[in-house]
């Protein structure tokens, strides 16, 4: 909920006028070719019986416990841009360790 509220706050701060007859413009988020601001990744569980799904937005990371949460995150990525590729990492993978150290887990 915090995460969604922060995204909505950012999007509403752009001063878009919804009463205008012009089509609503997609907000431009700062992004380079090399990095994705929004993406989803999966981390295999230690017991090997499934994966945990996470949504990364900038320097924040959120656990997606249900398919409803995953769909909402996918909709945000489709709406505002980001990688639609979902990477699956092993539990002790160096790449997932870097993501976890570089991002803050929010609830």
Image: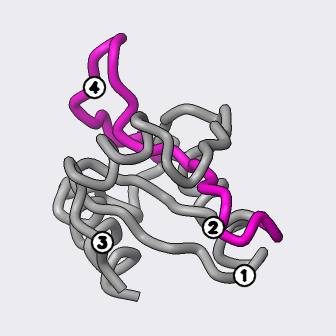
Mark number displayed over residue 36? none
Q: Which residues are magenta?
A: 24-50
Viewer-side residue, 92 vs 60: 92
User: How many other residues sit within 10 Å of disc 2, few (<14), some (14-19) or many (≥20)?
Assistant: few
Q: Disc 3 designates what residue?
A: 105
Q: Earlier in the sequence, mark 2 or mark 1?
A: 2
Check the picture and name the quadrant holding the N terminus: bottom left
Question: How far apart are the alpha carbons under marks 2 and 3?
Answer: 19 Å
Q: Earlier in the sequence, mark 4 or mark 2?
A: 4
Residue at the extreme right? 49
Q: How many circles with numbers are drawn on the protein?
A: 4
Q: Nearer the viewer, mark 3 or mark 1?
A: 3
Q: Disc 1 designates what residue?
A: 66
Question: How far apart are the alpha carbons under marks 4 and 3?
Answer: 21 Å
Secondary structure under the numbered disc 3 in the rendered image: strand
Viewer-side residue, 15 vs 103: 103
Q: Main secondary structure of the magenta part?
A: loop
Q: Earlier in the sequence, mark 3 or mark 1?
A: 1
Q: Classify residue 96 as left or right of residue 8.
A: right
Q: Disc 2 designates what residue?
A: 46
Residue placed at 30% from the left, 41% from the top?
A: 98
Secondary structure under the numbered disc 2 in the rendered image: loop
Q: Is residue 29 above or below residue 62?
A: above
Specify whether residue 6 is painted magenta. Answer: no
Marks 2 and 3 close (CB-CB < 8 Å): no
Q: Nearer the viewer, mark 4 or mark 3?
A: 3
Mark number displayed over residue 31? 4
Secondary structure under the numbered disc 1 in the rendered image: loop
User: How many other residues sit within 10 Å of disc 4, few (<14), some (14-19) or many (≥20)?
Assistant: few
Question: How far apart are the alpha carbons under marks 4 and 2?
Answer: 33 Å
């Amino acid at each position: 909920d915090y995460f969604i509220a922060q995204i909505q706050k950012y999007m509403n701060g752009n001063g878009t006028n919804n009463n205008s007859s012009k089509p609503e413009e997609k907000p431009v988020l700062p992004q380079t070719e090399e990095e994705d601001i929004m993406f989803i990744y999966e981390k295999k569980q230690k017991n090997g019986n499934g994966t945990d799904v996470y949504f990364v937005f900038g320097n924040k990371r959120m656990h997606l416990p249900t398919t409803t949460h995953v769909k909402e995150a996918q909709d945000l990525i489709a709406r505002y841009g980001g990688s639609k590729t979902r990477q699956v990492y092993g539990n002790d993978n160096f790449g997932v360790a870097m993501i976890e150290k570089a991002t803050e887990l929010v609830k």
